[in-house]
Amino acid sequence: MIQFLLHVLVISSVTSCVTLGYNFVFGKGKILHFGQLVQTMVAAYGLWVPITQYGQPFFVGLCISISLLLIVTLLLSWLSMRLEPDGYGVLSIALHLIIIAIVLNWNSVTRGALGIPKIPRGILPSTTFGYAIVCVAVLAAWVFFLWRVDKGSFSRNLSALSENEWHAQSLGVSRARVHAIAFSIASGGSLISSILFSPYQGLLTPSDFHFPQMIFYVMCVVAGGPGKLWGVLGATTALVFLREGIRFVSISPSYIGPVQLLLFGAILFISVWIRRDTVFPKERKI
Amino acid sequence: MQLVINAFIAGSLAALIAGGLAFVYGILGVFNLALGQIALIGGYTTWWLYQVHSVPLPVSIICGMAFGALVSWLIFEVFINPFYKRHRFLPLVTTIALSMILDAVILMVFRERPRSILPGVKEQISGFGITISPVQIVMICTTLVFLFLLAYFLHSTSFGRKIRAVTQNDIAASSLGIRSGLMHRIIFIISGVLAAAGGIYIGIDTSLTPVLAFSLTIKAYAAIIAGGKGNIWGAILCAYLISLLEQFAIGVHWFGTFYISAGYQQTVALLVIILFLLWKPNGLFVSSSRKA
């Protein structure tokens, strides 16, 4: 039981880093972005492929990962400004599927569906207890950083843009700058998760990056309240606990996946139903 | 030549689904991300009636499409209607939730095993450098008949004119006494019937598996974006074009030696989406609404 709770703590801390970053794009910015896993995949493979496949030191892998992530972040940010919101939503799904097709088919580098085994933990603790403490500490630092950002002018600019783009721009809010920062924050969450998640599992596999995982992020943001830092943190923790806890329910293993899908689909729908006036709000009227 | 035939077979399926999707997007302005699941429901219902209960094939097919229509209507009432007038992006999220629920139901009821409606039919006809099965010829012809009937319904009946009026201007059509709410429902049900027909097509041509749904939806999106969002005929034409591109991309040895792995086949459709969104966001055949 203790081991399970520690495991949930690790997974929810790592997942929260991503969902809290994503919350700035989808929740606060109302940008219809379904490509968060593009950033996470690029960060993870950019980091661990040089280290495990080519014997590079961690620092080199990290530099490659950040460089690739920066390119992807700027690309996504640029695309989000160039396209209509629904067009961008579909494009981000398309980008996700393209990256996962590359990961699955570029066997010589990524080892395809088998994934990359023996991801080293390096200086990270070898016990689950130690790992959980590190993850919680990293999450606390990340939450503090995001809380400060949330209280700052950037957050107000992002909210203003999401509410009325033209009015916000007429007041001097730079859409390009705000979008670039929002996507950078989301990428930061992805990078932290890539550093912590794969060594914990000891494996980097494409099965962790399929579209249902993206929907899980959307669900965490919608259920927690779009744009709400503490709400998303709570929702992520609760939903990770639910997802991991389902494995212990006495049902046939072949039904666990479908039951998870059914449950999360229902939670997402109910969350949208409850928050149907705030997920994509209308303009404020005086 | 074989590649063109293959493209025609795959394109006929994509055209059915993309046509329905374009119809819904053009009028309601909403993306339905659960359309692939509706297609599978149509296919699986037909398989269940024909293979498990030995109902005659034509009756099974009609029942499969009718069930697709029923499910579409229920989806409209629960997942679309309460949301799309509040914000047109809300159905995008609700249909994602719906796609998860339907995926789960399909997995629990039909399991992951491939299910073929006509598993024993392997007969092939060869000639002029091409190979095609009689079933595939029937499927292509049936799709064309379907599309022809849809064109007739839309352009030569008073009901079709009402639908087109709602497409052009919802409010103006309502002021002329056309019940736009009813039209929206009918349009959504028609898209469900077309999708269910697509699912039956897959079940007869190859086999049905639960994982197909998402790729079907994305390919249909590629077609409607390339064809001009909301332009049903543009979407149908682009469905055939994208299938042709997919076949040529993986079927041709480029420069004599280089070839693209079959694993990247779906990527072609996705690249089409991206290229069109970047360089021609309105698509090839933009439908413009009349101005007063």
Image (cartoon, rainbow, N blue to C red):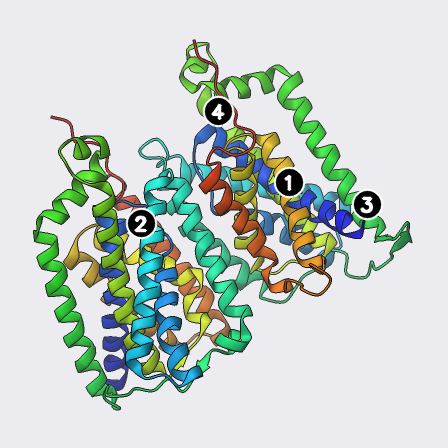
- Give the left or right position of residue A83, taking residue B148 as reference: left
Task: Give the label on residue B137, or none.
Answer: 3
* Residue at mark 1 to residue at mark 2: CA–CA distance: 32 Å
Which tag is nearer the camera, tag 4 or tag 2? 2
User: What is the CA distance from the residue labelled 4 to the residue labelled 2?
Assistant: 40 Å
Identify the amino acid type marked 4.
Leu
In the depicted view, which residue is nearer to us: A224 or B265? Answer: B265
CA distance separating discs 2 and 3:
46 Å
Do discs 4 and 1 share a chain? yes
Q: Earlier in the sequence, mark 4 or mark 1?
A: 1
Residue at numbered disc 2: A77
Determine the chain carrying the residue at label 4.
B
| Number of other residues with Cα within 10 Å of mark 4, as a class: few under 14, some 14 to 19, many 20 or more | few
The percent position of residue B71, horizontal first and vertical second, equals 53, 43
- Which residue shows up at 81% across the image and 45% down it? B137
- Of the two numbered discs 2 and 3 in the rendering, the one whose residue sits closer to the viewer: 2
- Residue placed at 33% from the left, 73% from the top? A244
Relative height, residue A107 to residue B43 (above, below): below
- Give the Cα distance between marks 4 and 1: 25 Å
Which chain letter matches label 1? Answer: B
Mark 1 residue type = Ala
